[in-house]
Each structure stands twice: as C-alpha cells, then as structure tokens.
Image (cartoon, rainbow, N blue to C red):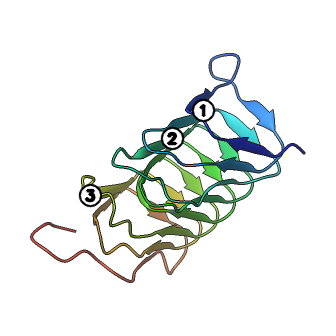
Amino acid sequence: QEDVTINKSIQLLPIASDSMFVVFGEYTILPAAGRQVTIVGMDNLNGSISLTANAPGFSPMQFNLFNSAIRDSVYITGTGVISRLSGNDIDDKVFVGVSTLTGNEFTDDVTIQSDASLTSEDTLYVVGNRLARPLFWESTTHYFYIANTIFKNASGLTINNIKAGAGQN
C-alpha cells in the first residue's frame, strides 16, 4: 500500500482511453488557492481520498473525480473547494461541501455540508445518482437541485438545513 500526498495541480489519468489505473492507498490532497486536482479512472482497491483543510485565498480550489471506483471514503470537507464527482462508484461514506454530483453509485451515506466561503456557486446539483443509503443535506449556504436520483433506502433524503432567501430549493 502506498499513501500519496498531492500538493500541486495535477491530473491523474489512465494510460489508455476507457481504462482504469489500479492503486492501493490513502490519497491526501493539500489545498491551495487556484489549485486544480483531477482524477480520472482510478480504481483504489484499499484507501480513501481526503481534502479536509481549508483552501486559503480568493481563488477557489477545484477537485474533480471522474469515472473512478473508490472502495473507501471520500472526504472533501475543506472550505474554499469546489468538487465535481461524476460517474464514480464509491463504496464508503462521502462528505462534500460545494459539489456537483452526477451519475454516481454511492453505497454508503452521502453528506453535503455548508461552505460560506464560496457564495459564487449558488446552487449545488445532485443529478442522476443511485444511493443505497441516505443523502443528508446539511448546507445552509447554498440552494439545492436534486433530480433523477434513485434512493434505494426508505430514508432516502434527509434535509436538516436549507438556505433561506429569494432563491429556490
């Protein structure tokens, strides 16, 4: 098992189109204003992805996870980070802040939290996902748009907080 710390803008891609690269280990991403980290086609057989510190500065950090299989959790909870997760299969808990979640298969709980530092992203999108466990909406700083998402669990969607104002949830 190799644990990896990412402290630069980077794209991690498979060597061939429509394939995946296999890894074993924890991936820790260190935030920085303007940093962009994109992972495409990762098959992490034993490890999680985490970005839990706050990104300083006025330029938000971008984190993208596309078409990957993660057997452990994904924690993208630092403020000042915009994350996009699309086409993934994630087997453990997911915690995110300002995020767009499209076309994912989530086996465990998904929690979306507040991030008052990124008010430019007014609405967060959860579209076309399949969730075996509940989605917990905890954000008081952003509106939500949830559509075409299958909840396989009876408790499905739990909205604990919403953003008040002129916008629409």
Amino acid found under the numbered disc labelled 1 = Val
Whether pointer 1 and pointer 3 mark residues with C-beta atoms closer than 8 Å, the reply is no
Q: Around disc 2, counting alpha carbons within 10 Å, would you say few (fewer than 14), some (14 to 19), or many (20 or more)?
A: some
Report x, y in % for residue 130. 52, 57
Rounded to the nearest angstrom, the CA distance separating label 1 from label 2 is 8 Å
Earlier residue among tags 1 and 2: 1
Front-lying residue, 74 or 145: 74
**Separation of disc 3 and disc 2 at Cα?**
18 Å
Q: Earlier in the sequence, mark 1 or mark 3?
A: 1
Visible residue check, residue 102: no
From the viewer's perspective, tell me whether residue 3 is left or right of residue 121: right
Question: Which residue occupies the extreme top position in the image?
Answer: 16
The N terminus lies in quadrant: top right
The residue labelled by disc 3 is 123
Binning the other alpha carbons within 10 Å of mark 1 as few (below 14), some (14 to 19) or many (20 upward) gives many
- Label 3–label 2 contact, CB within 8 A: no
Q: Is residue 98 above or below residue 103?
A: below
Residue 50 location, x and y as percent? Answer: 64, 55
| Residue at 41%, 55% in the rendered image | 80
Amino acid type at image mark 3: Thr
Which numbered dot is residue 40? Answer: 1
Query: Would you place residue 122 above or below residue 115 in this image?
Result: above
Is residue 1 found left or right of 43 in the rendered image? Answer: right
- SS of the residue at dot 2? strand
> Residue extending furthest front?
57
Find out whether the residues at labels 1 and 2 contact each other: C-beta distance under 8 Å: yes
Which residue is at 58% across, 45% downward? 88
User: Going from the N terminus, do you reach mark 3 or mark 2 first?
Assistant: 2
Distance of label 1 from label 3 (alpha carbons) = 25 Å
Residue indicated by mark 2: 64
Give whichever of 84, 3 is nearer the camera.
3
Q: Can residue 64 be seen at all in this image of the molecule?
A: yes
